[in-house]
Amino acid sequence: MEWLQKKGVRVPEGLLKAELMQLVSQHTSDADVKYVIDKMASYHGHTVVHLPPYHCQYNPSELIWAQVKRYVSKRNSFKIANLKPLTHEAINNITEENWTNAVTHAEKIQADDARRDVVDKFVDSFIISLTSSDEDSE
């Protein structure tokens, strides 16, 4: 909201996150931000997918990294020299199925959060005000 307001955009109260993101996308363009990594990836026929910052639960690579760390921690004998080869071994053991499962899980969390956001809006707007005359009734 603050970013939109700094851009001079009027932001109505009570918008859902999805509605705020739609407003943001209406007031930004690809020309606004250029990253060197995006250009490099594009040159090689790839597209970089930018994930929302501060939401590691939406990032499948966090789940993969957790698998790598778990693999290393189970096999490391607490010797620094073992870390690099074990890490390479763990990364090489990550399969396409691991990635598919991680992406599916992250997408499910995003969908669940989006549904919950809609419910929260309605729950937050359901307020019962009690006045002195209401207290005397059943």
Image: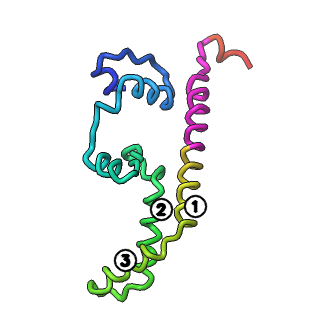
81 over 106 or under it: above or below: below
Count neighbours of disc 3 (C-alpha within 10 A) and say few if under 14, some if 14 to 19, many if 20 or more. some
Pointer 1 and pointer 2: residues touching (CB < 8 Å)? Answer: yes
In this view, 5 is above or below 114: above
Q: Which residue is mark 1?
A: 101
Q: Position of residue 24 (x, y in %)?
A: 39, 27
Residue for point 29% across, 46% down: 39
Q: Nearer the viewer, mark 3 or mark 2?
A: 3
Q: CA distance from mark 3 to mark 2?
A: 15 Å
Identify which amino acid the numbered label 3 is placed on.
Thr
Q: Find the distance from the CA under tag 1 to the CA under tag 2.
A: 9 Å
Q: Position of residue 32 (x, y in %)?
A: 28, 31
* Colour scheme employed for the rendering of this structure: rainbow
Q: Residue 95's spot in the image, x, y percent?
A: 52, 70
Query: Closer to the camera, 93 or 15?
Result: 93
Nearer-N-terminus badge (3/1) = 3
The residue at the far top in this view is: 133
Secondary structure beneath dot 1 equals helix
* Residues drawn in magenta: 111-132
SS at mark 3 in the image = helix
Q: Earlier in the sequence, mark 3 or mark 2?
A: 2
Residue 74 falls left or right of residue 110:
left
Q: Secondary structure at mark 2?
A: helix
Q: Quadrant of the C terminus?
A: top right
Residue at 53%, 52% (x, y): give it: 106
Q: Read off the residue under disc 3.
A: 87
Q: Check residue 120 for magenta coloring.
A: yes
Looking at the image, do the residues carrying marks 3 and 2 touch, with CB atoms under 8 Å apart? no
Which residue is labeled 2 in the image?
Answer: 63
